[in-house]
Image: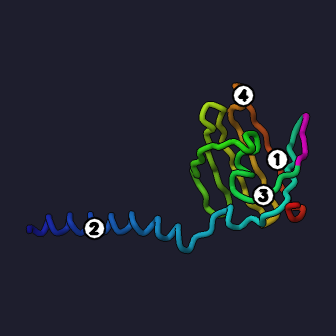
Amino acid sequence: MTRRGITISLALALAGAVGLAAPLAAQGGSTTLFDKLHLGTWEIRERGEGATTRRICLRRESDLVQLRHRGMRCSRNVIDDNGVSATVHYSCNGNGYGQTDIRWESPELIQLRTTGIERGSPFAFAAEGRRVGDCK
């Protein structure tokens, strides 16, 4: 093998090792935004005109991500999660879709924005979420 061939082979091997290391690092040591949140009852307080406040029992990621499509089976794709903010896109197979951006402030306080389509109509809202206790 020529010197150039060896260099290319080493470069490809290194690129492969880096490509494999990233998912392994994500599995092992990094913390996602959702790992940092305390489970329990959360109060979601929307902002703006006609704002509503509701309580949800946060048991899993979808409880926060799919506020307008609660209880539906939807596929989710985490676009970004750096531990402080996360963006998740979801699709509910013919029943609409959405994208939710969450910003972590503490294990018991978040800011979120979500947009999408529900029952054929667009929606968008911003809200603050606070943990208020355990789920009943």
Are dots 3 and 4 in contact, CB under 8 Å?
A: no
Q: Residue tagged by mark 2?
A: 13
Labels 4 and 1: the sequence-earlier one: 4
Residue 29 placed where, x, y %? Answer: 56, 74
Are dots 2 and 1 in contact, CB under 8 Å?
A: no
Q: How far is disc 3 from disc 4 in space, using C-alphas? A: 24 Å
Q: Residue tagged by mark 4?
A: 119
How packed mark 1 is, by other alpha carbons closer than 10 Å (few <14, some 14-19, many 20 or more), is many
Are dots 1 and 3 in contact, CB under 8 Å?
A: no
Kindly report which numbered mark, 1 or 3, lies closer to the viewer in this rendering. 3
Task: Identify which residue, 31 or 96, lies in the foreground.
Answer: 96
Task: Identify which residue, 103 or 53, lies in the foreground.
Answer: 53
Q: Which residue does the image show at 72% across and 26% down from the upper left? A: 121
Colouring used for the render: rainbow
Q: Residue tagged by mark 3?
A: 58
Q: How far is disc 1 from disc 3 in space, using C-alphas? A: 15 Å
